[in-house]
Image: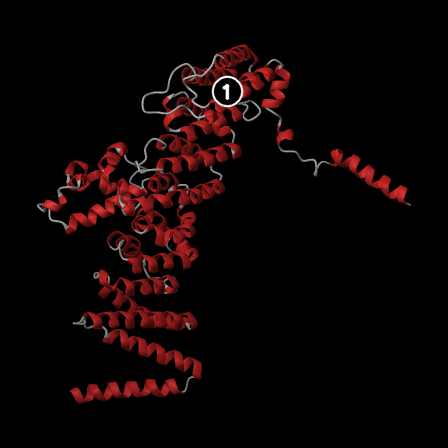
Amino acid sequence: DRSEVEGSVVSMVSVTSSSSRLLPPKERLREKAFQYCQRLIEQCDRRAQKKADSELQKACLVEAVCILDCVCAEDASMVYRAFPCMKALFGRLSSDLSFARVLLPIAQFYLNHGEMDTVDCERVWKLVFGQFPAELFNDAFLAYELLRFLRLNLENIQSRAPEFVQFFPNFLKFLAWDSPAVVEDFVDLLPSLVTTGTAVELLHTLLDLPCLAATLVLQLRSTCLPIADPNSRGLLSLEAFRNPAFRGLFLFLLRAQAGSGDTIDRLSTLHELLAEAADWPRVVRCAQTVPVLLHVYFNTVVKMDDRKLLAHLVLVMLERSSLLLRIPSYSKEIHRVFSCHLRRLCKLHPSLVVDQSHELLEFAGATANVYNKEEVYTHVVWVLGEYLSVSSDSRCSVKLITSCFEALEAVLFEITSSTPPPGTICPAPRVITTLMSALAKLASRSHDLIPRASLFLSKLRTVSRNGSVAWCADEEDLVAIVTRGEELWSLLKAPGVAQSVLTPPAYVTTPRWHRDTSVAMPLQLRALTSLTHSQ
């Protein structure tokens, strides 16, 4: 009967309390804290009616879970007693995302102690890495807590839940939504997201981050504004977001996990649909953080030292230089980053120029790139002139050097013999001088090309001396171009000198005099002489 049950419960409590009194003070404190937290979690089982009570309930649960985590960290034997309670609490709260701030400490508990109890944590990671960013990307508190959780437990997560890397499209939603608040977190986190399998897709995703910011805005507006609401008709991008024909483009941006493809085929279409979002404050702020993250990305990729991956990234940079959302100054900033790291990659691995010579020549041979991708074009021409040589890669043939020379010669001839296309300005002097230098370098490596290079440089000098030209508006710039042409022309008159100056051997560009004992011998002799003479 009931009296017997109550009597047995009382006796069990009295036995537990009496046994806990026999424990040392520190262990007794742990036992009491453990019991108190379990009782508190059980008492929070009922749903609060008022919002204030609900917030208090969540705060109590967070504190109880955190204390249990600390107690189990000090006494591993309590993990087996705590996990049934944690599993029940997770099962009860996981379907209600309003308890997200409670579920994160539970995830921390699983991360710290799940291995000891051999618990399947997959459901926990799918919720934390999958649902939270996808549905609560606009919750500033959760963004802070989740990114802090990732940063503080990065090594543990990499070993216990390596699949978290695949959720980088989801994590980047926090960055796209509120870039200034979380950019420092992503500077720390981004290197851990770069792997051989994710590097290419991650680069595309970073470049499309402003598009993701615009899409998240549209997603919220789409749920807030009814389809028949006249206020929503003014946004063409919102109509496109709701249009089934374009749904696939937006769903790709909103994907939760990587692996569905590096990018989409209709990027230009997507950029046209989002053209009106180019001046939205959230999109502009997001675009300003992309160059910073790209520097972090490339610094990480270089350390991986995967030549096949680096060769692929060179192609991505060439392709994406013309496929960017049209935000004022965004393209220029991205081109500047691409130029910096293209040069760096080719300097570290000169063979990349021969590996991707076809694509680089195709890019350098397009005259339109001179006017709308000046920064990238200049550096592509520079790496072709600098590293397309036998000294950099034994596979470099005379045929390849000649084809590169002809492509650059055609572009230089076209821009110096005609007016710029309508709507464009004159090419920058740096582009012209870089083209001239590249031609001279290539000619010095294949002496059959020297007469052609010399003839072109002399014609350029003659044309420029006749007065103003259509392709250069500034007189000082024209003088600088002519001077550079005369210097190169003078060098090419002595092929041996030209080759040593324009393509110096490695021991000249990277001297090792301080390590070479033979070169250091005169210094040693002078030191010995001074010592003996002083005596």
Residue 299 can be seen in this image: yes
Q: Of all residues shown, which one is farthest toward the left?
A: 228
- Measured as percent of width and height from the top left, residue 7 is found at 23, 89
Viewer-closest of 44 and 387: 387
Image quadrant of residue 27?
Answer: bottom left
Question: In the rendered structure, which amino acid carries the disc numbered 1?
Answer: Met
The quarter of the picture where the C terminus appears is: top right
Viewer-closest of 443 and 48: 443
- Measured as percent of width and height from the top left, residue 199 is found at 39, 41
- Density class for disc 1 (Cα within 10 Å; few <14, some 14-19, many ≥20) is many
Q: Is residue 359 above or below residue 335?
A: above
Q: Which residue is mark 1?
A: 436
Viewer-closest of 11 and 295: 295
Q: Of all residues shown, which one is farthest toward the right?
A: 535
Position of 405 with respect to 214 (left or right) is right
Q: Is residue 478 above or below residue 319?
A: above
Which residue is depicted at the point 46% across and 15% down?
406
The quarter of the picture where the N terminus appears is: bottom left
Image quadrant of residue 493?
Answer: top right
